[in-house]
Amino acid sequence: MVLFGSSMSDGNRHDPANLPIILAGRGGGRLKTGRHIASPKGTPLCNLYVSMLDQMGTPVEKFGDSTGALALG
């Protein structure tokens, strides 16, 4: 897995909402590829990190301001 993104969606407004994020790779066959996943408004980015850690075999209950895992598999 390779994560590429920005912590600002609009640099002029310093807006941290609706972030442009790309998650590439198959995670050793654990991830479905070729998809666009739109999370509900207000979903913390840390939810993605929780999901990635889980896919790598390092499950955590919480990371940063996470509220749960995303469905990546």
Image (tube, rainbow, N blue to C red):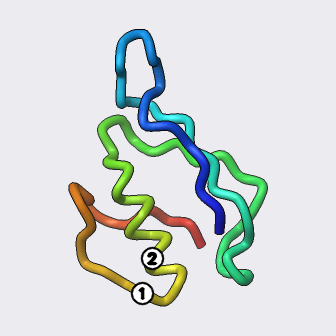
Above or below 18: residue 45: below
Q: Which residue is mark 1?
A: 58
The residue at the far right in this view is 34
**In the displayed structure image, the side of residue 45 where residue 4 appears, left or right:** right
Quarter of the image that includes the C terminus: bottom right
Which numbered disc covers residue 28?
none
Give the Cα distance between marks 1 and 2: 5 Å
> In terms of image quadrants, where is residue 32?
bottom right
In the image, 31 versus 40, the foreground residue is: 31
Image location (x, y in percent) of residue 27: 67, 76
Seen at 49% across and 89% down, the residue is 57
Q: Earlier in the sequence, mark 1 or mark 2?
A: 2
Q: Helix or strand or loop: what does disc 1 sit on?
A: loop
Image location (x, y in percent) of residue 38: 53, 42
Above or below 23: residue 12: above
Seen at 55% across and 35% down, the residue is 20
The three-letter code of the residue at mark 2 reads Leu
> In terms of image quadrants, where is residue 15?
top left
Q: Helix or strand or loop: what does disc 2 sit on?
A: helix
The residue at the far bottom in this view is 57
**In the displayed structure image, the side of residue 10 where residue 61 appears, left or right:** left
Question: Local crowd at mark 2 within 10 Å, few (<14), some, or many (≥20)?
Answer: some
Seen at 45% across and 18% down, the residue is 11
**In the displayed structure image, the side of residue 42 where residue 28 appears, left or right:** right
Quarter of the image that includes the N terminus: bottom right
Confirm or deny contact between disc 1 and disc 2 (CB under 8 A).
yes
The residue at the far top in this view is 12
Q: Which residue is mark 2?
A: 53
Image location (x, y in percent) of residue 18: 44, 31
Question: Local crowd at mark 1 within 10 Å, few (<14), some, or many (≥20)?
Answer: few
Q: How many marks?
A: 2
The three-letter code of the residue at mark 1 reads Thr
